[in-house]
Image (tube, helix red, strand yellow):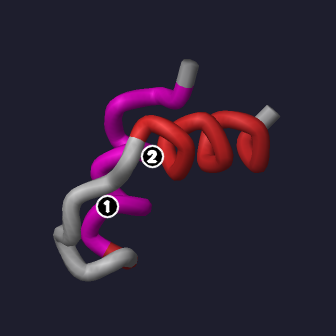
């Protein structure tokens, strides 16, 4: 799982748009 701070940073960088479960999984894979 992503650290909350990193997740929030990524969400802000993406422009606060809604993320789909697939996108969240992709973000977790990138951080692995």
Magenta stretch, main secondary structure, is helix
Residue at x 24% of width, y 80% of height: 15
Give SS at disc 1: helix
Give SS at disc 2: helix
Residue at x 52% of width, y 51% of height: 23
Residue at x 22% of width, y 59% of height: 18
Instruction: Please indicate whether residue 30 sits to the left or right of residue 4 in the image.
Output: right
Quadrant in which the C terminus is drawn: top right
Q: Is residue 6 above or below residue 28?
A: below
Q: Give the mark nearest the N terminus, 1 or 2.
A: 2
Residue 26 on image: x %, y %: 66, 46
Q: Is residue 19 above or below residue 14?
A: above
Q: Which residue is mark 2?
A: 6
Instruction: Decide which of 5, 25 is in the foreground and name it.
Output: 25
* Chain part drawn in magenta: 2-12
Q: Quadrant of residue 31?
A: top right
Q: Nearer the viewer, mark 1 or mark 2?
A: 1
Q: Which residue is mark 1?
A: 11
* Label 2 crowd bin: few (<14), some (14–19), many (20+), radius 10 Å: few
């Amino acid at each position: 799982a992503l650290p909350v701070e990193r997740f929030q940073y990524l969400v802000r960088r993406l422009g606060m748009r809604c993320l789909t479960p697939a996108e969240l999984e992709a973000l977790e894979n990138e951080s692995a």
